[in-house]
Image (tube, rainbow, N blue to C red):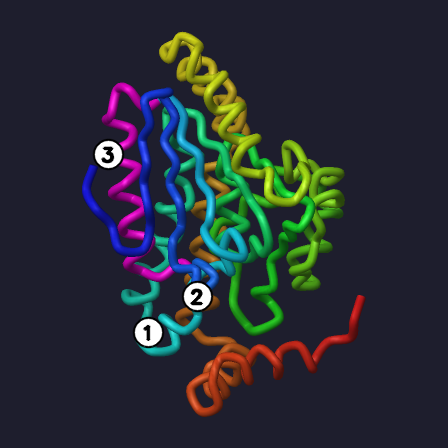
Amino acid sequence: MNSFESIQVDAGDDGVAVLKLNRPQRLNALSKDMLLEICEAMTQLEAEERVRVIVLTGSGNGFSSGFDLKDQMERRPKGPQVWREILDLDLTTTMRFWRSPKPTIAAVHGPCVAGAFEMALACDMTIAAEDAFFGEPELRFGAGIVTMLLPWMTSPKHAKRIILSGQDRVGARLAMEMGLVSEVVPPGEHLSVALRIARNIAKMDPDLVQQTKKAIQRTYDVQGIETALAAALDIDHGIESHGSPDKVKFMDIARNDGLKAALAWRAERFEDE
């Protein structure tokens, strides 16, 4: 297994591999480099015969704050081609967990929002600590949704409530009621529970497990999930390459006064719900 800078990968002898997002100083924000490393790690883990289940988790105080706004702020992407490359990588990386032939389990604590929420949704199961919270705040600062998985995981009313109002503090219990989480566990037990589930899956015939996952995924394929996600990505491409006035303002404040000031500006614009 290659060594990585922004993630840690540990493939044990029990058939379970742990892929840990490891930028705790940035709340595991998903930078371009991290996304590329996740893709490379998934390629290696899928090729490794002894690995039967993949567990995705985050180090430090939370799962992840989502796609790295500071990285985007510093790179200043402009133009349709540049945005197409950025968004294609975002979607491709997220969907590696959905499309993987091997079962994937997200073990979540703390914040799991925006692109990170989409990544957890892409996993076959999500085990959430009671302190975990989820959401899609993108519209509140003029961005679109990259991987439109949420409507496939819950009711239209719940999906629209979260996305169109930019909710980003959906607690673990409510997320489970919405069908977005598989199980809620006491604080600090998210990873141990996910690993226990993974070890039990790893004891089963791997071909049987993979073929059964394929059969389950086929249900969504028939309903057109890949076509819908591609169409949603095209819409987001138009949003990002055109540039919402809210996004321009947010980024201007971030560059001039820092990301915390931009987040404060965003928060001040909306009433508590």
Q: Amino acid at mark 1?
A: Pro
Q: Which residue is mark 2?
A: 26
Q: Amino acid at mark 3?
A: Gln
SS type, badge 3: helix
Q: Which residues are magenta?
A: 30-51
Question: Going by the image, does 115 lie left or right of 12?
Answer: right
Q: From mark 2 to mark 1, how far is it between C-alphas?
A: 21 Å
Residue that sits furthest to the right in the current view: 273
SS type, badge 1: loop
The image quadrant where one finds the N terminus is top left
Residue that sits furthest to the bottom in the current view: 256
Toward the viewer: 242 or 129? 129
State yes or no: discs 1 and 3 in contact (Cβ < 8 Å): no
Is residue 86 a member of the stretch shown in magenta?
A: no
Q: Can you give x and y, in whole percent of width and height, for residue 75 in the image?
A: 31, 75
Q: Which residue is mark 1?
A: 77
Q: Is residue 113 visible from the viewing direction of this image?
A: yes
Quadrant in the rendering for residue 95: top left
Q: Is residue 245 visible from the viewing direction of this image?
A: no
Question: Going by the image, does 54 lie left or right of 150?
Answer: left
Q: From mark 1 to mark 3, how far is it between C-alphas?
A: 30 Å
Toward the viewer: 171 or 16? 16
SS type, badge 2: helix
Q: Quick one: label 3 or label 2, which is nearer the N terminus?
A: 2
Question: Going by the image, does 59 lie left or right of 176?
Answer: left
Residue sitting at x 57%, y 73%:
141
Q: Amino acid at mark 2?
A: Arg
